[in-house]
Amino acid sequence: MASLAMMFPLLLATGFSFEARNISTQNALVATFLVLYTFAYSWGAGIVPFLYSSEIFPQVLREVGMGWSSCICFLGAGILAITVPLLIHAIGQTAVLGIFAALNSLALLLVWLFVPGTERHIVTMEEMNYVFGVATRKHMRYQRDEVGPWFWQKYVRMKREVKEPGPLYDYARGGVS
């Protein structure tokens, strides 16, 4: 999530760097923001899909699941490799990076709503099964009712003493969070 959140402004900054009047300034800005974007991408959105998909498939289907996950990921990369040069030629670098930034912000919202997090409260594989056994509707409600207000209070309003939401699987079972 943090990776996707960092990628959005860096894509916009890279796109607007192409509008600089001085070519040496333009090159320096583009290079700087591309390096920062690559850093943000590499520790999150770049590797997490492979790690996450390796966690969610049961042992008996893990090879097949990872095969399909990798296939879909690399198919998308191939489509991008074919279409991006055509898009740049048609609408320019700034517009293309603006579109990708918008898609990145949509991805951030979709990941927050639909993808159960495995970084908090999970110690054993049984707990992992509980998390992935929760219906998507309940997960979305948990994100909206528990995580969203907690995030707002802690990171936007900067309150120090904010009670962290309980585990998703407790929330889904009707437990107190």
Image (cartoon, rainbow, N blue to C red):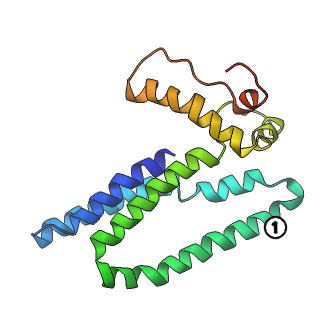
Q: Position of residue 55 (x, y in %)?
A: 74, 51
Specify the farthest residue to the left: 22
Whether residue 115 appears in this view of the structure is yes
Residue drawn at (71%, 28%) of the image: 171
Residue 120 rendering spot, x and y as whole percentages: 64, 33
Q: Residue furthest right?
A: 60
Instruction: Identify the secondary structure beneath mark 1.
Output: helix
Q: In which quarter of the image is the C terminus?
A: top right
Query: What residue do we see at 52% from left, 33% from top?
Result: 148
Structural crowding at the residue carrying mark 1, measured as other residues with C-alpha within 10 Å and reported as few (<14), some (14–19) or many (≥20): few
Q: Name the residue under label 1.
A: 64
Q: In this view, does 22 lie to the left or right of 102?
A: left
Q: Is residue 43 visible?
A: no
**To which quarter of the image does residue 26 belong?**
bottom left
The answer to whether 57 appears left or right of 52 in the picture is right
Rendering coords of residue 97 (x, y %): 35, 67
* Residue 77 % position (x, y): 54, 74
| Residue nearest the viewer, comparing 15 with 38 | 15
